[in-house]
Image (cartoon, grey):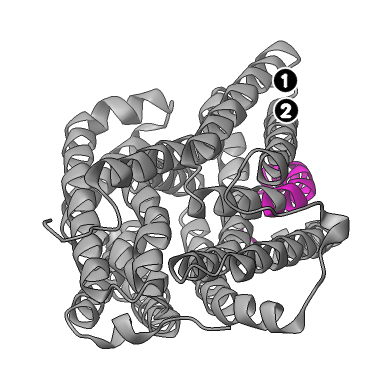
Amino acid sequence: MHMDRAMFSKKQIYDIIIPLILEQLFMAAIGMFDIVMVSGIGENAISAVSLVDFINQLIYSVLNALCTGGAIVCSQFLGQKEKGSARAAVQHMIMLAVCAGSVLMMAGLAGNGPILRVLYRSIAPEVMSKARVYFALSSVSWLFIGLFCCSAATLRVLGYTRISFHTSLCMNVINIGLNALFIFGLKWGVFGAGLASLISRVVVSLFMFRAVLCRQKMLDIGMPWKWKPARKFFVTVLNCAIPTGLESSIFYIGRLLVQTVVTEFGTSAIAANAVGLTVTEFLHMPGSGVSIGMITIVGRCVGADEKKQARSYARYLIGVVYVSQGILNVIVAILSPWIADRYHLMPQAKELLILMLVTHAVISTIFWPMAFTGASALKAAGDIRYAMIVAVSTMWIFRVAGSWLLVHLVPQWGVLSVWYAMYADWIVRAMLEWKRMHGEVWLNKRIQV
């Protein structure tokens, strides 16, 4: 990647993306450690935690997408050297994220039982009772997840990725320590797992928000009571945040609907699917970290009207994901029997898990980077609506409808039908994103107030 007056050196790129990749690994580890540490209690506990974790992922994705929209606006304003507008974008993003987190928390607490019964009507009563406990504690954490997401998005887009990484590491250390105390020491089971996650999220979100207010020097954010809400900045942030939020929420609603298909195959299938998704989420962390870095790198290039650099950096970063994710997939495919043993699964669930991990390794290596990291490049440039339309369309046509169709046409595949439908979604999405990135339209979406 040779460019005159490059906006980012290779060292600067890796200084941005490596902490982000590690941060994503640690963030994903919270759900994984909860599942691993309750696995000794039995498959009912694994199923309860994993089913609620799907809802947690939906909430996190909505709040994170909302903040991603604000971060894209901030990044492009920084590229345009409009620091006042960038500051206002951050302030309005934080206000929106905290309000959204509060509303979601109250809705979750008020609708605990009905929400779970609507989504998972087929699960056993003993799984439901544990799921309700974990869901209540998770609901309280959603306000703090909103605060964490907006604080982390601000620090990342300003280049303070190490702060975000270190706090995510602390979150996991706190979570693991409290899990050990609550689950194994005090024998609190699923309640202990949920309480550990809640406490770790509260502590770290408050620390992150303090860092935004006091530790970063690029933008003088000021104290919240001094902020002046302005309609034009709410509109600008929401113009990016609403499409990203809709895409993310519709995506996870689709996943939840697919999960209702999984519950019909019994507890072993639920457990194998939960562990498979948990492990494969880790394999996507390099791509997730690079995708977040795209906002800072590609977003600033487009804001500065450096279109050639934006395209070049996007291609380079997607290549980084292909290499890193390919290596991880090969390792996991080889170690899949050993990984299955670590989760204390029954023989049937273990066999399913190994097949999931091996097939995933092949498809993910070839198609996932372009499908998802490529989409992030488009979003960072401001081509948000196209990315949303592609993501929502392929999700519902291939993953949701495809899962239902395969389950009925090829019932002998069982829960694997859901995975094959997911692969079809990735393949089509990757082809559409590849075609878009080879054109010029996505580079002409510069954001203005």
Classify mark 2: residues with Cα within 10 Å, few (<14), some (14-19) or many (20+). Answer: many
Main secondary structure of the magenta stretch: helix
Q: Residue at x 19, y 57 (%)?
A: 316
The circle on residue 274 is: none
Residue drawn at 37 percent across, 72 percent down: 304
Is 136 on the left-hand or right-hand side of 24?
right
Q: Viewer-proximal residue, 120 or 300?
A: 300
For the record, the magenta segment spans: 120-146
> What number is the disc on residue 192?
2
Q: Secondary structure at mark 1?
A: helix
11 to the left or right of 112: left
Provide residue 185's location: percent of width, then percent of height: 71, 11
Q: Could you tell which of marks 1 and 2 lies nearer the N-terminus?
A: 1
Quarter of the image for residue 183 reads top right
Identified by mark 2, the residue type is Gly
Residues under numbered marks 1 and 2 in contact, where contact means CB atoms less than 8 Å apart = yes
What is the quadrant of residue 41 in the picture? top right
Residue 265, relative to residue 244: is it above or below?
above
Can residue 282 be seen at all in this image of the molecule? Answer: no
**Residue situated furthest top in the rendering:** 185
Quadrant including the C terminus: bottom right
- For label 1, the residue is 182
Badge 1: few (under 14), some or many (20 or more) residues near its Cα, within 10 Å? many
